[in-house]
Image (tube, grey):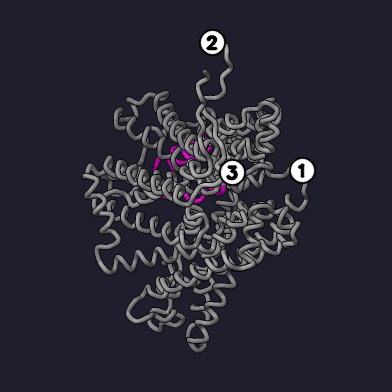
């Protein structure tokens, strides 16, 4: 044994500050590595050479105008839900109930279309629909926030449970309203009359969704970075005690922010039913409430960064779907690829926040 | 007529995956790790077992050639390895790299469910069957083997002895976990890590090691839940997405039992019963109401969550450091 006592081989130190350049370099390296890992995995299953796999992934989104629009629609919906998550996460309120909040928006929109379609003027119907969807999402999100602010109820678990309550509510109403009877499906709502369908801009079915997403991104960016509310969020996120000390009513901030989150999720649900899908299924949100958590987190809750991360995930899942179709693999292949990328991005944050210091050899 | 003798065994069969999942998650949460990857881990556990069983069945060909020991051990070991690796991945990201637990957990769930469905789908393709499922009838026989005297014991036998061995394993694991957490020194230290890692660290407890062990063992237990579901409950038939929401129910159950694995034995039975209650309640033509019944476990869990936060009894609270990463120099 050595006489000298040695320290551990390596230890980690928190980086005081990292320049944006360095942070970006680390993230870019992580994305590059993750794409290599994905290529390796794809190669193992298909035996095709990686270049042509990438070509297939590219074609999945860009081969035709239609595919491009579908990609844009997917990116927009994912982006909207991620935007909804961001303000709450900025104050470390872990809302993982996006799925349920979107479903409530979906349910509110569909119920307006089914119950009121044809009974009142269409313009009025659309206005009621918008209000209902926003209100339903907002209320669904505010319930956990209320309990968190009053009794400090664990919001992660609460919002998680609310997802399933919402999904079951949707399942209940699907059976109530199913058409044709016994099919277990609702089908296209008001297919012939188009009552309650949101207006289509020109000949582009998906343009409305894209425009709403763009507008919300700008609004949220301003809200989070330039407004008093946004500043309060940041303070609450850094330290609740500090926030209380300087006179921010933390409980009120929780409820207010969750109302906003839920409202935006409601809009996502409104767009899905009113503008693109025109139907209600229990899988309409399709796990995007959860994916949005990762999208928002990977972009460090920066609305502009989320454009990129949501694009990355939507593009990859389309591309992997295309690879799966071409090589006769299962469609779940895209889930595997996107989670590999997420794992790398989650892991790389460590190298942004900390530095590894190796032991210096004693002389 | 409410047929209790057929109701109870079916509820128990529903309950067992939930019991295993919630026991594993309780151990994990006691170390301060909120592992939302449990649904994914249960999928991985299930599909790993299925892969093991599939290749074993391909090799032996028929029931006569199968060896009881191997038929049980191979899927079991595959399942444990698969779910252990998932636990290790979670720990590496959250404990070593101090990543956010919620995000990591959700990514693991996406990955695990995708992994299960992908390999499930690939195996289905390999068998070239017309139905979208794989039937593992040989290994299922061994997993579902009942106690030999269960048939002769009448109602008692039907209610208590009429299960595959994993049901009893689940109950033993739950009791052992409770004993471990409340009656042993290591259990006390584990709880200390979950309540206040800085204090535990100062007392000389290796926080990282406890988190790693608790999470990995917890994952393996949860993985067994997936294995039970395929091998016993689903009669050895894997079909994609069949496992459903059970992983989230297991997480709900952890809250419902207020972090107590022994209570979970009864509570999981209650959840299992609620899950299938609609089959036994005469609903007539009203099919919709059964969707409302399925909501019940989640609503009950929310109520428990609210009540424990209102009453503020200290022994009923979630582990204080639940969901927070620990970095020694950041106290």
Q: Is residue A60 above or below residue A130?
A: above
Is residue B21 positioned above or below A170 on the image? above
Q: Label 1 near label 2: C-beta < 8 Å?
A: no
Q: Could you tell which of marks 1 and 3 lies nearer the N-terminus? A: 3
Q: Nearer the viewer, mark 2 or mark 3?
A: 2
- Residue B34 image label: 3
The percent position of residue B119, horizontal first and vertical second, equals 35, 42
Tell me: A239 left or right of A88.
right
Disc 2 to disc 3: CB gap under 8 Å? no
A194 magenta-colored: no
Residue B274: x, y in percent? 60, 51
* Secondary structure of the residue carrying numbered label 1: helix
- Residue reaching furthest front? A363
Quarter assignment of residue B322:
top right
Q: Which residue was labeled with disc 2?
A: A1
Question: Which chain is indicated by disc 2?
Answer: A
| Disc 1 to disc 3, C-alpha distance | 19 Å
Where, by quadrant of the figure, is residue A206 drawn?
bottom left
Q: Nearer the viewer, residue B173 or A53?
A: A53
Q: Nearer the viewer, residue A269 or A234?
A: A234
Q: CA distance from mark 2 to mark 1?
A: 48 Å
- Marker disc for residue B314: 1
Q: Quadrant of residue A155?
A: bottom right
Q: In percent of the image, x 51 and y 45: which residue is there?
A: B105
Question: Looking at the image, is A277 positioned above or below residue A57?
Answer: below
Residue at 69%, 62% (x, y): give it.
Answer: A146
Q: Which residues are magenta?
A: B220-249
Question: Is residue B230 one of those drawn in magenta?
Answer: yes
The quadrant of the rendering that contains the N terminus of chain A is top right
């Amino acid at each position: 044994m050595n006489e000298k006592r040695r320290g551990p081989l390596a230890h980690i130190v928190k980086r005081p500050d990292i320049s944006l350049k360095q942070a970006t370099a680390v993230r870019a390296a992580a994305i590059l590595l993750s794409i290599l890992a994905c290529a390796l995995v794809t190669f193992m299953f298909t035996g095709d050479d990686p270049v042509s796999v990438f070509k297939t992934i590219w074609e999945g989104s860009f081969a035709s105008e239609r595919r491009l629009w579908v990609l844009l629609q997917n990116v927009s919906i994912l982006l909207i839900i991620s935007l909804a998550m961001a303000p709450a996460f900025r104050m470390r309120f872990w809302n993982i109930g996006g799925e349920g909040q979107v479903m409530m928006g979906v349910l509110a929109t569909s119920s307006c279309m089914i119950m009121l379609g044809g009974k009142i003027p269409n313009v009025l119907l659309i206005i009621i629909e918008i209000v209902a969807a926003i209100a339903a999402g907002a209320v669904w999100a505010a319930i956990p926030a209320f309990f968190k602010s009053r009794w400090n109820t664990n919001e992660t678990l609460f919002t998680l449970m609310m997802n399933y309550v919402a999904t079951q509510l949707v399942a209940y109403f699907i059976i109530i309203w199913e058409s044709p009877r016994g099919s277990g499906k609702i089908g296209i709502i008001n297919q012939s009359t188009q009552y309650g369908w949101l207006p289509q801009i020109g000949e582009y079915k998906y343009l409305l969704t894209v425009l709403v997403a763009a507008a919300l991104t700008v609004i949220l960016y301003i809200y989070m970075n330039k407004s008093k509310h946004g500043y309060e969020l940041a303070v609450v996120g850094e330290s609740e005690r500090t926030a209380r000390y300087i006179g921010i009513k933390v409980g009120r901030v929780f409820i207010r922010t969750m109302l906003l989150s839920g409202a935006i999720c409601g809009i996502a649900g409104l767009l899905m039913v009113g503008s693109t899908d025109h139907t209600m299924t229990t899988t309409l949100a399709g796990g995007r409430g959860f994916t949005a958590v990762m999208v928002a987190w990977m972009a460090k809750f920066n609305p502009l960064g989320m454009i990129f991360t949501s694009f990355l995930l939507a593009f990859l899942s389309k591309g992997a779907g295309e690879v799966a179709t071409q090589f006769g693999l299962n469609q779940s292949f895209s889930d595997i690829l996107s989670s590999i990328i997420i794992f790398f991005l989650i892991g790389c944050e460590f190298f942004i926040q900390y530095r590894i210091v190796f032991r210096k050899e004693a002389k | 007529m409410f047929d209790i003798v057929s109701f109870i065994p079916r509820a128990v069969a529903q309950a067992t995956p939930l019991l295993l999942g919630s026991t594993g998650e309780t151990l994990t949460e006691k170390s301060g790790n909120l592992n939302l990857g449990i649904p994914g881990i249960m999928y991985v556990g299930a599909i790993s077992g299925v892969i093991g069983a599939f290749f074993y069945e391909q090799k032996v060909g028929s029931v006569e050639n199968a060896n009881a020991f191997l038929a049980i051990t191979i899927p079991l070991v595959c399942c444990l390895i698969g779910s252990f690796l998932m636990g290790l991945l979670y720990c590496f990201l959250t404990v070593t790299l101090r990543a956010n637990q919620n995000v990591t957990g959700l990514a693991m769930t996406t990955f695990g469910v995708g992994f299960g469905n992908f390999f499930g789908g690939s195996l289905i393709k390999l068998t070239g069957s017309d139905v979208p499922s794989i039937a593992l009838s040989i290994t299922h026989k061994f997993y579902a083997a009942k106690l030999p005297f269960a048939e002769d014991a009448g109602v008692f036998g039907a209610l208590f002895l009429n299960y595959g061995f994993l049901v009893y394993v689940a109950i033993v694991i739950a009791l052992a976990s409770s004993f471990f957490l409340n009656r042993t020194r290591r259990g006390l230290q584990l709880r200390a890590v979950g309540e206040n890692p800085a204090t535990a660290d100062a007392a000389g407890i290796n926080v990282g090691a406890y988190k790693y062990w608790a999470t990995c063992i917890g994952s393996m237990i949860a993985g067994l839940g997936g294995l039970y579901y395929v091998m016993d409950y689903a009669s050895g038939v894997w079909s994609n997405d069949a496992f459903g929401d059970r992983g989230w129910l297991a997480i709900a159950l952890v809250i419902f039992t207020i972090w107590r694995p022994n209570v979970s034995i009864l509570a999981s039975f209650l959840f299992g019963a609620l899950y299938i209650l609609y089959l036994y309640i005469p609903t007539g033509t009203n099919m919709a109401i059964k969707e409302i019944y399925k909501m019940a476990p989640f609503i009950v869990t929310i109520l428990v969550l609210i009540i424990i936060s209102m009453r503020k009894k200290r022994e009923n609270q979630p582990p204080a450091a639940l969901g927070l990463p620990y970095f020694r120099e950041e106290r």
